[in-house]
Image (spheres, grey):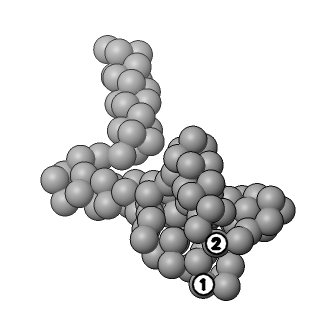
Amino acid sequence: MIDFIEKTMLAGFGALSLTQKKSEELLKEIKERIDLTEDEGKQLLSRLQNSAKENQLKFEELAREELQKAGSRMGFVPKEEFDALSKKVAKLEKQLKAKS
């Protein structure tokens, strides 16, 4: 029964993470509707929070990848590449000044 409720709730929450307060409110409501022990409720809350954190990390990684793809399509250069080229230009300028 707990697994069914957990899966149903996770499906409903999607990639959204719950705040501590909202999680506790939701858990209290669930405990009132079905007969959960305190330990079962805490375990459920813990699993939901862990899952929400994992989903948030996955979402952040996907967003980062999409931003990189969009930047690449628009012709933006990654900061690391820009910094390397900037150092190379500075070195070449220094060499040119030394030859003059």
Tell me which amino acid carries mark 1.
Phe
Find the distance from the CA under tag 2 to the CA under tag 1: 13 Å
The residue depicted at 40 percent of the width and 54 percent of the height is: 64
The secondary element bearing badge 2 is classed as: loop
The image shows residue 35, relative to residue 71, as above or below, that is below
In x, y percent, where is residue 83?
A: 41, 34
Please tell me how crowded label 2 is: few (under 14), some (14-19), or many (20+) other residues with Cα within 10 Å. Answer: few
Could one spot residue 90 in this view of the protein? Answer: yes
Residue 80 screen position, x and y as percent = 44, 42
**Residue shown at the point (51%, 78%) measured from the top left:** 8
Residue at the disc numbered 1: 4
Amino acid at pointer 2: Ile
Instruction: Tell me: residue 83, above or below residue 27.
Output: above
Q: Earlier in the sequence, mark 2 or mark 1?
A: 1
Q: Nearer the viewer, residue 64 or 59?
A: 59
In the rendered image, the quadrant that contains the C terminus is top left
The location of residue 14, given as percent across then percent down, is 43, 68
Mark toward the viewer: 2 or 1: 2
Q: Residues within 10 Å of mark 1 (few under 14, many from 20)?
A: few
Q: In screen coordinates, is 3 left or right of 18? A: right
Locate residue 87: give its quadrant: top left
Question: Circle 2 sits on which residue?
Answer: 34
Q: Secondary structure at mark 1?
A: helix
Q: Nearer the viewer, residue 56 or 83?
A: 56
Q: Quadrant of the N terminus?
A: bottom right
Percent across and percent down for residue 43 are: 77, 64
User: In the image, is 84 to the left or to the right of 50?
Assistant: left
